[in-house]
Image (spheres, grey):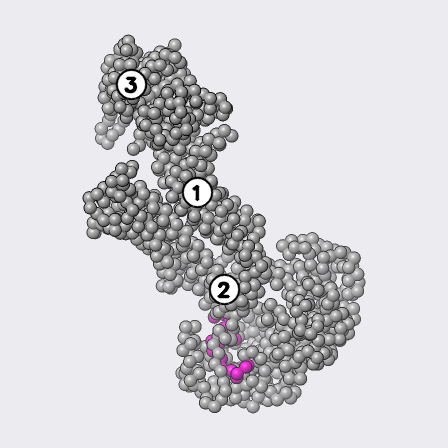
Amino acid sequence: MNLVFRLAWRNLWRHSKRTWLTTGAMIFSNVLLIFMIGLQFGMYDLMIDNTLQTLTGHVQIQAPGYKDDQKMRQSVADVAGLASSLRTELGSDRVAARGAAFALVSSEDRSYGIAVLGVEPEYEGNVSTIPGLIKEGRFVNGPDAAEIVIGAALARNLRIGLGQELTLLGSGRDGSFAAAVVTVVGIFDSGVADFDRSFAEIPLRFFQDMFYMDGAGHQVVLTATAIDDVPELQRRVAELLPAGEELVVHDWDALQPGLKQAIRADMSSAFFMYGILVILVAFSVLNTQLMSVLERTHEFGIVLALGLTPGRLGRLVLLETAIMGMLGLLIGALLGAILTAYLGVNGFAYPGMEELAAKFNLPARFFPELTLPTLLAGPLVVFGFTILSALYPALRLHRLHPVEAMRAV
Amino acid sequence: MTAVRCVDLCKTYHQGEEKIKALDHVTIDIVEGGFVCLSAPSGGGKTTLLNTIGGLDKPDSGEVYIAGRRIDNLRKGELAELRLRNIGFVFQAFNLIPVLTARENVEFVMQVQGVAAAERGEQALEILQEVGLAGLEDRLPADMSGGQQQRVAVARAIVSHPALVLADEPTANLDSKTADGLMELFCELNERHKTTFIIATHDKRVMSYAKRLIRMLDGRIVDDIEQNAT
Amino acid sequence: MHMFAILARLAWRNLWRNHRRTFIMLAAIVLGSWAMIFMTALMRGMVTEVIKDGISALPGHVQVHHPKYRDDPSVANLIPIPDSEMSAKFAAAGLKGWASRVRVPAVITSEYDSRGVTLLGIDPERERGLTFIDYDEIDGRFLESVDDPGIVIGRKLARTLETEIGKRIVIMSQDPDNEIADRGFRVVGLFTANVTAFEEAFVFAGKSTTQKMLRIGDRTSELFAVGDDYRNVDAVYSQVTELVDAGVEVKSWFELDAYLGTMLKVMDGFLLVWVIVIFLALSFGLVNTLVMAVFERVREIGLMLALGMKPRNILGQIIIESLMLLTIGLVIGTALAWLAVQPIKEGIDVSIVAEGMDMWGMSSVLYPELLLRDVILANVVVLVLGFFASLSPAWRAAHYEPVEAITKV
């Protein structure tokens, strides 16, 4: 060990209680930051996944204007063909075509106006969780079978069960009257009654026949393997679009503009809180290092008289702070990692969380995320501020006059 | 009447492997109004004896009586009360509370005793005058010389008229002229208020003021002589 | 009492002996308590907005329904009491605000398209100011009476249906006998809502007009009442319960919307956690300051003990010193938080994340809300915890042996 380092190390432990208390403040906030940031990003990922995976997907191909107006005639020609060629070109099955229309769905007793989606039965499960949420019966399977899957709440309100028939009434793409009779083959339950009440799914070909779509649909839905791959996917899809046709490729942020902003709004309040925490730690360090410099005035006076420069003394003070900061960083990161890893496996719940979480399609238990960035971001910022706050005490040394300093008690 | 009675006091300290006998079967009686000097070389046991009499330290065996009351078996709180009401202390240094002025330092003991503000203010002023500090009442300890600080300490020790004042090397940090002044003050107060003084010292000139001189060595009393004060 | 005066004086003077240390600690406490209270005010304001918006969407503090209506919101589940009978009772009861309405699912059809909506048959005069509709912000006009022949729809819906003021649309629903009930309406007004989804979900018609169309005579789907304070609805709840017969379901807003209900509770819990976290971050510095202060004063503490001051008085002195420090910091921090709230009292515009706020159920203007009880909570928690944090250094100080302390160099 080099001599300066040994000197700094010993100086730190002259007041071991004070050093531990200051390090304790760092450890406390590091553990908290690692946990909170992990929880936050774990939650964002879930929010994004849960919101997008039910129906929206990561990227959609639509006709211009459809996103805002959702009119029947804003359609994508030969939607199934487009989806199929994309599957080949991209080498991915996570592509599915859809049609969407409004229809009045009636049982013997009741009628409701809902959205009817025409889906490709064999591919829909790759871009949406609805096929996996079937609680009774099965998903639609024939490409043009007169079948429908509906939500549990809608089934209850329509007073209808598996195997029974529903009448669909709507208007076709050309504005003409569209009607069909379909059999309920499956009932899905997402857990959110209002969502389940709002739509039903039928096979795409059947949809196209019923609404006179002439092979057209309204969306091609794609999902990427990871959320970070979305821009790349969007770029490639845009390149693969057939020439001459006016189509647009939207990413999830355009399709669900609230999502990113909700995250941003939540982030800004979270970062305000983290900022306060870090500054409080910085004050703690400033106090400790200023005290430790002031109480050593006499001793520093002697060293200055011996010919050491204030600059070197300042570096000694910074080194002491750095050692303390490093201790706080290492212990804090270790404890934070243990806590977060534990909760990442066992989950974390907060009273009342369940109801709040349900609103955003989130589970009642949260699992904080532990990655290198979530682990190190907080502690590194704390470390940075620790060093910054030692600058003032270190620079004060330049004002020290050896003779006066030695006279100090 | 006996002011202080010590019977067969023993006290041993451990310093590493070594055992140090600070008090070795010490028995003394000090009469009311006495002016006693305890003298011993460093480590001779005089501070231990003084602290034991003052209830700051407990003997391993033996008994201590103050004005006829046994004190070595009292609890901490009772000892605090005893020191507060019956004993005045003057230490070698760091006698004063740094954040309080001379007058507030003198008032401090009375205030803790619960003496009314008007009364204690007057008494404090009077006593500061008596020890020759008129005009310096509102100075903080840091703004006074060592001699002045010791005088404040003396004023505080006697202000509530304790029967007994214990002083441990009160002149150690003072020059000889100031030390003489302080000792004369002690004599004067002893005469006027009939207060018993016990002063631990190894300063020859301080000893010359004593009516009774007790010499100690290795925790034992080796010499006990009455002398006429100069 | 006199002892307290002595201790307070000593504590006060000691506090300013090392004024640099005191100022740094004070700055930390000021920042901490400012952040506690300012953040609390923002959060409170946010939650209040969410709840108020939520309540105006429900609407009301208390609602009356047929027991089956909430699971099956159809015309089959009307309140089994004639509306005129109920209205007479409610009018006589002197409630702050109340209204009864018809609320059924319906399909709205223009020349170009149709959509599923919720049809509200309302009494426009009774509902003024009680719902999310601002009567003065309507394009065209709002409904004028229960017999108004017109309909008011959302601006977004009008765009989707390609309709406008003065044009006709058809509303189709069901009567209690499951027969189609439909009627043509002229669009007389377009409304905007904070939550854009409402613009597509609701259409407003006159109560009597709707009752006639649905052939339900003198019956309604729901009745809601508003009390003075949404935080305390017990009074309205019991009043309403007394006014209606058994056979209906009376629910308060927090039962009707679990999300809103828990929001308030979770908020209270969260605020406490936030205050405690800030305190803990401060506590390291606080304890450190006290440990240092005690350490520097060992000799004089010994002196006071030798002079006959009782250990508990020393304990008291250190604790008073700590509480003084905290109190000064809290007072300044609270005052600064109050000042910080003043310029943004009229609301801060957070519309850059408007749709995100929408998703959290918030509007894009944030009104901070500084509640006395939050201020008291923060201050009391800090003082109480501060007291406990000071115990350890104070205890140490009180238990010095006077002889050892006084001879310590």
* Element type where label 1 sits in the image: helix
x and y percent of residue B57 in the render? 34, 25
Magenta stretch: give its range. A49-66
| Mark toward the viewer: 2 or 3 | 3
**Image quadrant assignment for residue A275:** bottom left
Relative to C172, residue B36 above or below: above
Residue at the location (69% across, 56% down)?
C227
Neighbourhood count class around disc 2 (C-alpha, 10 Å): few under 14, some 14–19, many 20 upward:
some
Distance from disc 2 to disc 1, alpha carbons, whole Å, reads: 35 Å
The one nearer the camera, A140 or A222, is: A222
Distance from disc 2 to disc 3, alpha carbons, whole Å, reads: 79 Å
Relative to C104, residue C38 above or below: above
Q: What's the amino acid at mark 3?
A: Asp
| Mark toward the viewer: 3 or 1 | 3
The one nearer the camera, A401 or A157, is: A401
Say if labels 2 and 3 share a chain: no
Question: Residue at label 2?
Answer: A265
Residue at the location (58% across, 80% down)?
A69
What mark, if any, has residue B180 been given in the picture?
3
Q: Disc 1 is attached to a residue of which chain?
A: C
What mark, if any, has residue C389 been given in the picture?
1
Q: What's the amino acid at mark 2?
A: Ala
Q: Quadrant of the C terminus of chain A?
A: top left
